[in-house]
């Protein structure tokens, strides 16, 4: 029943796996809006009900494990949204338990922004 954030969701394969593994809330983010739409479509094709939202402010990960006795019967909350690493205000609303990402660093100049986002996310939820 964890809140999971994927940075650079691409096609959404990891998101589908997170849902199957029992995550209570999955936020799939990418800086490219076309990738976000593709991810959303792939969620649907894999039988995962997901919301494609305009901003992270629309993401509501309720419960935070408070109703763990019924978490296995709950439908996980899954969101696909565009987030850029440079938009520091958007990241403040997220408090994920797990942060995942793969194949993120195409451009060396993006490394400082990624490090900044990770530091911010870890400091807001040190759990």
Image (cartoon, rainbow, N blue to C red):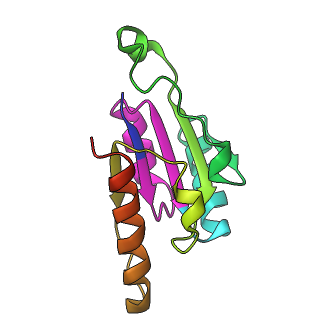
Q: Is residue 70 above or below residue 61?
A: above
In magenta segment, residue 37: no
Quadrant containing the C terminus is top left
Q: Residue furthest front?
A: 123
Q: Residue at x 43, y 55 (%)?
A: 6
**x and y percentages locating residue 105 in the rendered image:** 38, 80
Q: Residue furthest top?
A: 69
Query: For residue 109, which quarter of the picture?
Result: bottom left
**x and y percentages locating residue 46 in the rendered image:** 53, 41
**x and y percentages locating residue 113 in the rendered image:** 44, 78
- The number of callouts visible is 0
Query: For residue 33, which quarter of the picture?
Result: bottom right
Q: Is residue 14 above or below residue 23?
A: below
In magenta segment, residue 11: yes
11, 93: nearer the viewer: 93
Quadrant containing the N terminus is top left
Q: Which residues are magenta?
A: 5-29
91, 51: nearer the viewer: 91
Looking at the image, residue 97 sits to the left or right of residue 29; the answer is left
Q: Is residue 78 above or below residue 27?
A: above
Looking at the image, residue 90 sits to the left or right of residue 20; the answer is right
**x and y percentages locating residue 18 in the rendered image:** 38, 41
Q: Residue at x 40, y 61 (%)?
A: 120
Q: Residue at x 39, y 50 (%)?
A: 124
Q: Residue at x 35, y 73 (%)?
A: 115
Q: Is residue 12 above or below residue 60?
A: below
Q: Residue furthest left?
A: 127
Q: Residue furthest right?
A: 54
């Amino acid at each position: 029943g964890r809140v999971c954030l994927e940075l650079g969701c691409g096609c959404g394969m990891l998101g589908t796996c997170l849902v199957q593994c029992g995550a209570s809330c999955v936020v799939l983010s990418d800086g490219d809006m076309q990738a976000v739409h593709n991810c959303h479509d792939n969620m649907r094709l894999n039988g995962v009900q997901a919301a494609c939202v305009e901003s992270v402010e629309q993401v509501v990960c309720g419960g935070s494990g408070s109703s763990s006795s019924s978490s296995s019967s709950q439908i996980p909350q899954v969101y696909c949204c565009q987030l850029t690493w440079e938009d520091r205000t958007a990241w403040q609303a997220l408090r994920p338990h797990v942060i995942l990402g793969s194949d993120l660093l195409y451009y060396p100049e993006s490394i400082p922004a990624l490090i900044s986002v990770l530091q911010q996310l870890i400091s807001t939820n040190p759990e």
